[in-house]
Image (cartoon, rainbow, N blue to C red):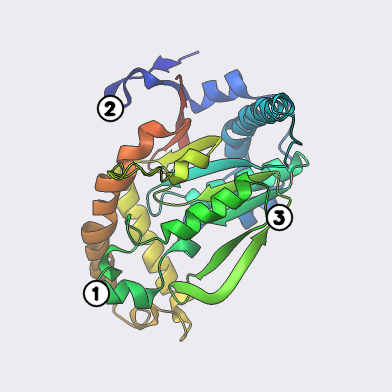
Amino acid sequence: MSLVSGSGTVGPLFDRYTAADWAVAWGGSAPPPLDADDIRRLRGIGNPLTLGEVERIYMPLVELLVTHMGAQWDLRRRRAALNRRPGRPMPFIIGLAGSVAVGKSTAARVLQSLLQAEGRKVALVPTDGFLLPNAELKARDLMHRKGFPGTYDMRALVGFLTDLRLGRPAHAPVYSHQTYDVVPGRTVAVEDAEVVVLEGLNVLQVGPLQQDGEHRPFVSDFFDFSVYVDAAEDHLRRWYLDRFLALRATAFQDPQAYFHRYAAMPEAEAAAFAESVWESINLVNLRDNILPTRARADVVLRKDEDHRVREVWLRRV
């Protein structure tokens, strides 16, 4: 096995596995509970997910998650009994973080599908719905920083997670990628879920501590397990540009789409616009806010230029 102890920027916190060794060390012998149609449904734009990758990377990860779930739920039952109170059905919460265009949504959908195949009731909640509405971002001159810390309704997001932790019905706002905005008044109820996957750019982010002595939890305080999907900057840049041009030929063609004006723009001009967005917004957010949280994850899925996971980093401590 070519396991490599943590090195470089990750330090000694992680053990690093090649994809093949990860499959041997943590995988089982059962075939994937998905077929080719499932894989096509789960793929994102420009993300060449394969059944082999599901078997080598995601099924072993689900095995690890199921082990953590069993231990966590047993601990909660024991603590409830110790304090002589009824055990509340609190879900196991998984945080999934990473850059724009890295494939977070695809990874989240795969985990949801595999856990559902294990008989679990799984809710997938993107944090996009907790972004402040565009009108408010414009009023605060924050549209150019959309997706950065400070552009989310953190009170609502923490309230949502608190409801989950207390076993209460929780409601998540809905975001439309066509209108590029939160859908007014629309929410999705998350009830009776055994597992919740919370997916977003900055879910592992922490901020400055309060100076007034009041405890204000971070989103990651609610996680039972966390995953960071990682790739080199030059790969992320290319994937973002490719995705923008693919959307220009598809979703942006809708006259109701927020980015419809780029559908008729010459390709070179549209590519230049996408490049400027990557350099001035997404890359800055990655370097300043997203990448620094990678070392806080329990597992890092490290992708190569072909969008395939080539390494898995498993946190030691």
Q: Position of residue 66 (x, y in %)?
A: 67, 31
- Disc 2 crowd rating (10 Å Cα; few below 14, some 14-19, many 20+) is few
Read off the residue under disc 1: 269
Taking depth in this image into account, of 49 and 174 the one nearest to the observer is 174
Q: CA distance from mark 1 to mark 2?
A: 37 Å
Query: Are the residues at dot 1 and dot 3 in contact (C-beta closer than 8 Å)?
Result: no
Q: Which is more toward the observer, 46 or 215? A: 215
- Number of numbered discs visible in the structure rendering: 3
Q: Amino acid at mark 3?
A: Glu
Q: Position of residue 190 (x, y in %)?
A: 66, 57
Residue at x-position 69% and y-position 31%: 73
Q: Mark 2 vs mark 3: give the one in front.
A: 3
SS assignment at label 2: helix
What amino acid does circle 1 point to? Glu
Counting residues from the N terminus, which is met first, the one under dot 1 or under dot 3? 3
| Visible residue check, residue 234 | no
* Residue 121 relative to residue 7: left or right: right
Residue bearing mark 2: 9
The first of marks 1 and 2 along the sequence is 2
Identify the residue under disc 3: 191
Structural distance between the alpha carbons of marks 1 and 3: 46 Å
Does 7 appear above or below 33?
Answer: above
Q: Nearer the viewer, residue 194 or 3?
A: 194
Q: Amino acid at mark 2?
A: Thr
